Amino acid sequence: MSTLHLSFYSTFMLSSLGLAFHRTHLVSALLCLESMMLSMYISLSIWPVENQMASSALMPVLMLTFSACEAGTGLAMLVATTRTHGSDQLHNLNLLQC
C-alpha cells in the first residue's frame, strides 16, 4: 500500500472516529461527515488515473454532487435546530419530543 492510499484511509478512519466519539455539537458532526466525503472524493478522483480507466471518471462528479446536497441539508438542519432548541448541542435533541 502506498503512502497516498494510507493517508486517504487514515483520513477516512479518523473522520469516522471523530464522528463516533466527539458528538457534542452538530457542527462537529457535520465537519466529520464533510471530511469523510472529501477523502472519498479525492480517492475516487485518483483511482481512474491510477488504473487508466476512463469509464469511471464520472464517479467523482456524482460524489461531489451528493456531498454538496448533504452539506446543504446539514446546514439547513443546523439552522432549524438552532432556532428551535437554542443551541446546536446534540444531547438537547430528542426524537421522541418532536
Image (spheres, rainbow, N blue to C red):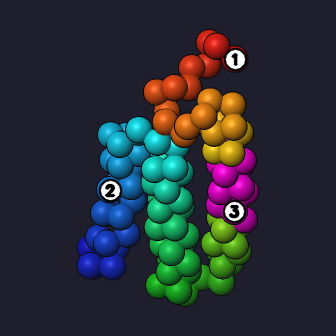
Q: How far apart are marks 2 and 1 (CA)?
A: 32 Å
Residue density around tag 2, few if under 14, some if 14–19, many if 20 or more, within 10 Å: some
Measuring 52% from the left and 50% from the top, which residue is drawn there? 27
User: Where does the magenta region start and end?
Assistant: 65-77
* In the foreground, 30 or 59: 30
Q: In this view, does 85 lie to the left or right of 26?
A: right
Decide whether residue 66 is among the magenta residues. Answer: yes
* In the foreground, 57 or 32: 32
Q: Distance between the residues labelled 3 and 1?
A: 27 Å
Type of the residue with mark 2: Leu
Q: Which of marks 2 and 1 is nearer the N terminus?
A: 2
Q: Residue 68 carries which label?
A: 3
Q: Find disc 1 in the rendering and name its residue.
A: 98
Type of the residue with mark 1: Cys
- Asked if the residues shown at circle 3 and circle 2 are in contact, with their CB atoms under 8 angstroms apart, the answer is no
Decide whether residue 68 is among the magenta residues. Answer: yes
Q: Position of residue 2 (x, y in %)?
A: 27, 79
Measuring 53% from the left and 86% from the top, which residue is drawn there? 49
Above-or-below relation of 45 to 62: below
Q: Where is residue 95 in the image (x, y as percent from the top left)?
A: 61, 19
Q: Find disc 2 in the rendering and name its residue.
A: 14
